Amino acid sequence: MKFLDQAKIYIKAGNGGSGSASFRREKFIEYGGPDGGDGGDGGSIIVESDRNLNTLIDFRYTQHFKAQHGKPGSKRNRTGASGQDLILKVPVGTQIYEEDNNTLIYDFMKNKEKYLVASGGKGGLGNVRFKSSTNRAPKKKTNGKIGEEFWVWLQLKVIADIGIIGKPNAGKSSLLASLTRAKPKIADYPFTTINPNLGVTNYDGKEVTLADIPGLVEGAHKGIGLGGKFLRHIERCKVLLHLIDLNENDLVNTYKQIKTELKSYDKKMNTKKEIIFFNKSDLLNKNDIKKKLIEFKKKVKLKPEVISVFSSKDIKKIKKILIKYAN
């Protein structure tokens, strides 16, 4: 399934039906009086979150959404039928913005949340509503109100327990594939992943949701390498998993570069819990790994875990650590 995390759509709630101006007509009753019914209300547009969805791709090809209009009233005081509401399903983590794509309308954080985004027009009044002691046969009726209509933006920010971050080609997609049933595209070149991938891993009866965030490069917070698009998805993650290739010449600089990009995008990013994994240990000898660890811990004051995503023993260890941090 293709991933889409932003879409602009036009929504139009239904108009209310017009009221009826009719009079009772029966044999032997010359002056039956008004009996025009009210018009039905127009249908509204409601947005509902669904945890089974993970993309806004349905809104790429269909951009106009209209709810049903209310039916007009009729004689014998019959009220017109109300228009049916239109319910749009979106993934959990979707935000609705006004047309300026800056003013937030609503933020879906839980499954099955509903938000009435556009109200249908009220139905018009039939002439029976205007009968009075001084006007026994009113011809007045009112038309239904116009339903709300406007453009809105939908933006999806992935919600996950743990976000896997790092430079391109650090092995993030391979790690996700090893931990979960997710099947991200994997290849030995940068920017294989151009959209977030989600997966769920289980250990000791507990469950953790992971997101493979596309590789970050220097200047990502300025939009370089689609950085702004990628960083947006990290905001929702509870814990950040820094995955660093042990073959990098300067592990400290690599770690600090990612931290700088996060902080430059949003200072709150640096307050999140973090885990550091040094990947691709199968490509180096133990002495080289030891030297790199000593240098890193000396300058960063944090203890990373050394792993290989192709080691079943390491995968079990990783799951145990992730469950501890995410719960």
Image (tube, helix red, strand yellow):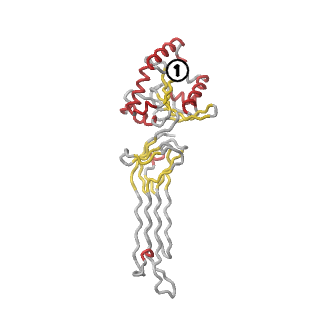
Q: Nearer the viewer, residue 57 or 269?
A: 269
Q: Is residue 16 above or below residue 241?
A: below
Quarter where residue 139 is shown: bottom left
The percent position of residue 174, horizontal first and vertical second, equals 53, 27
The percent position of residue 180, horizontal first and vertical second, equals 58, 32
Quadrant in which the C terminus appears: top right
Residue at horizontal 46 percent and vertical 85 percent from the top: 31
The single residue placed furthest to the bottom in the displayed view is 28
Left or right of 111, for residue 145: left
Residue at horizontal 48 percent and vertical 83 percent from the top: 32
Which amino acid, by three-letter code, is at mark 1?
A: Lys
The single residue placed furthest to the right in the displayed view is 205
The single residue placed furthest to the top in the displayed view is 287
Q: Is residue 310 above or below residue 122?
A: above
Quarter where residue 307 is shown: top right
Q: Secondary structure at mark 1?
A: loop
Q: Is residue 61 above or below residue 139?
A: above
The residue pinned by badge 1 equals: 280
Residue at horizontal 46 percent and vertical 16 percent from the top: 298
